[in-house]
Image: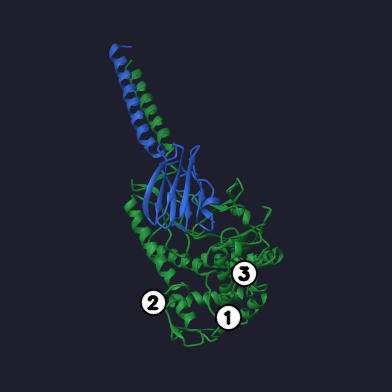
Amino acid sequence: MKKNDFYLIIGILIATAIVVIFSNIITRKDTAGAVAVVTIDGSEYGRFPLDRDVTERIEHSDGAYNVLSIHDGICEITEASCRDQICVHHMSVQYNGQTIVCLPNKLVVTIENSNNDDIDGATH
Amino acid sequence: MKRFKIISAVIILALIALILAVQYRGKSDVSVNNGSNKELSKYTINFLDVFDTSTDITGFATSKEEFDKEANLIKEKLTYYNNLYDIYNEYDGLSNIKTINDNAGVQPVKVSSDIIDMLEFGKDMYELTDGKVNIAMGSVLKIWHDYREAGLDSPETASVPALFDLQEAAKHCNINDLIIDKDKSTVYLQDANMSLDVGSIAKGYAVQRVLEYCKANGMNNILFSVGGNIAGLGARADGDNFKIAIQNPDLESSNPYIEKVEISDGQCVVSSGDYQRFYEVDGKRYCHIINPDTLFPAEGFAGVSVITDDSAKADALSTALFNMSIEEGQAFVEKLDGVEAMWVYHDGTKEYSKNFKDSVIE
């Protein structure tokens, strides 16, 4: 093998590595940084990354509240003032598009930028 | 030597292609190619404005803007039906179900054909279910509604309606007193004490109409979930069937789903249960589905799910099955074409109609 052949192969390997690294970065944007987006009556209240444990008491103007808890990469409502408590009983969420809804308080928690589970919708 | 160089170059290029293929495979469940070199991504929008419940519209589009355009059309349509079929609220310049109820025993009300058709469907369902689904049962349901609201507002004073009051109200639930005049496009309740409650069919009926509207307007690959009334138009963009989880009626369970099913184009899944809308009196649960025979909440099951090809029918049938015994229900489903059901008892055990398991994802 000539010296130039050697350089050619090294060059191609480096080019491959660059392509792989870049495409990795582009793909990672989709899965890293999963967040729970909280909206109240349609307007955004806040975004909570799933990789940071937090307990947030969300106060509504009429004195009502929901307590949002993020731990171990999952998000749930642990406490709420609403009378039906459907949001508290709701399963914890972590996958793309999953929601927890508190109808009385018009609160919606939606998971974005996370992994997909294989479910498109759920009855309730 | 030259040959060696060409071969190694080809091998290296093949390696690059392989690495890239592996890289992008992980994304294929999120985005797929629709054949015209445009990538389709999955989007979901949630809104709380219709049918007193939470609605999710899931679709596949090349951009968020494109999806939002379709989703907004769908929302507009659902809002239209929501207002028409509303029994509690009035809307400016609109004659809806509340208008009909307010004019019971007074006069016929001129209404849109979208109301006439829904009410006729309601009459059909009364026939089909032998009265287990009765949209003319408003007088009884109103009593339960008021007791439930009061019980939720102050649980310590929650109480159960007196049977006598319910029986008096039940004298005004005759579906034949609902007079529909198709030619004049009017509806008249000829018993002044009766009222319509279309809660058992209106949501499913609206979803079915909107799905047909979308289909007629060239939309595809859309999953509707209106308060758990789920209907699929087309399939996922990757061609796979939509996959639907059926919620576990036992909300305390660590297992959030009791079953997973897949639905083909035009199929829908609807669940009726006692685990979402209910109130408690002395520790006993009273749900919102009232059995027309006993005038009390049905207690046989924690939930019933129906799979069929019409969302309106699925809505009505899941209510009907919730009000029947398992034997009645099995025999009833057996008679119907293309209808499958799953019953869930309070201890978590399940029963299936003959072919329900064909839809279950193992």
> Given contact means CB atoms under 8 Å apart, are the residues at marks 2 and 3 in contact?
no
Say which mark, if any, is on residue A122: none
**Residue pictured at 37% horizontal, 65% vertical:** B76
* Display colour for chain A: blue
Circle 2 is placed at which residue position?
B94
Tell me residue A88's x, y (percent). Answer: 53, 51
Tell me residue B313's x, y (percent). Answer: 55, 67
Mark 2 or mark 1, whichever is nearer to me: 2
Give the amino acid type for the residue marked by disc 3 in the picture: Ile
Numbered-mark total: 3
Other-residue count near label 2 (Cα within 10 Å), few / some / many at <14 / 14–19 / ≥20? few
**Residue pictured at 47% horizontal, 54% vertical:** A101
Tell me residue B354's x, y (percent). Answer: 66, 58
Circle 1 is placed at which residue position?
B175
Asked which secondary structure carries label 1, the reply is helix
Gap in angstroms between the C-alphas marked 2 and 3: 29 Å
Asked which secondary structure carries label 3, the reply is loop
Give the amino acid type for the residue marked by disc 1 in the picture: Ile
Which chain does the residue under circle 3 lie in? B
Location of residue A40 (image quadrant):
bottom left
Which chain does the residue under circle 1 lie in? B
> Given contact means CB atoms under 8 Å apart, are the residues at marks 2 and 1 in contact?
no
